Amino acid sequence: MNIRIAVVTILRIALGVLLIVAGALKVGHSLDLAASIASFRLLPPTVIAPLAVALPFVEIFVGLYLTIGLFTRWAAILAALQFALYGVAVASAVLRGLAPDCGCFGPNDRATADWPHAAFDFALALCATLVAIYAPGSLALDRRISSK
């Protein structure tokens, strides 16, 4: 296995597991997540509740697709967009002098929006972009399907 395939595989699985864990920790805590989303003061109130209900499941499903390597390119594109949007939201909050709880890992996560957090989200977006470009890596269902 060459180094590029190994790196893509490691990134793909790590991002997938991260999204699964983040989503799973939010399931059943939509009120807490809605409060976190609202504290960024970016979205209209009518969008916040449905987003708080759907977001954990989107994270879990995108994470599952990345982890097993199915629809890898599309899942990685969605993950990259998601992480980039998180980074923009965090950076926007910092620029506006807000320090909301991010809610990234459920109600017990009290990490606040700051520049290192924004940088980390943008780094995750970059990693997901690399996976999208060089997908699927090894140990992927996409690879098994395309080889038949």
Image (cartoon, rainbow, N blue to C red):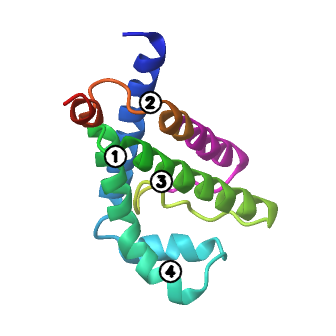
Mark 2 or mark 1, which is nearer to you? 1
Task: Identify which residue is drawn at 36% across, 52% down.
Answer: 62
Mark 4 or mark 2, which is nearer to you? 2
Question: For numbered disc 1, what is the local secondary structure?
Answer: loop
Mark before the other along the chain sequence, 2 or 3: 2
Distance between mark 2 and mark 1 Cα atoms: 15 Å
Residue 125 is inside the magenta segment: yes
Q: Position of residue 9 (x, y in %)?
A: 38, 26
Tell me the residue that label 1 is attached to: 71
Task: Identify which residue is drawn at 54% across, 72% down.
Answer: 37
Task: Using the image, tell me which numbered label, if any, was put on residue 48.
Answer: 4
Tell me the residue that label 2 is attached to: 11
Q: Amino acid at mark 1?
A: Phe
Give the main secondary structure of the magenta stretch. helix
Q: Establish if 40 lies above or below 115.
A: below
Distance between mark 4 and mark 2 Cα atoms: 30 Å
| Residue neighbourhood size for the residue with mark 1, other residues' Cα within 10 Å, grouped as few (<14), some (14–19), many (≥20) | some
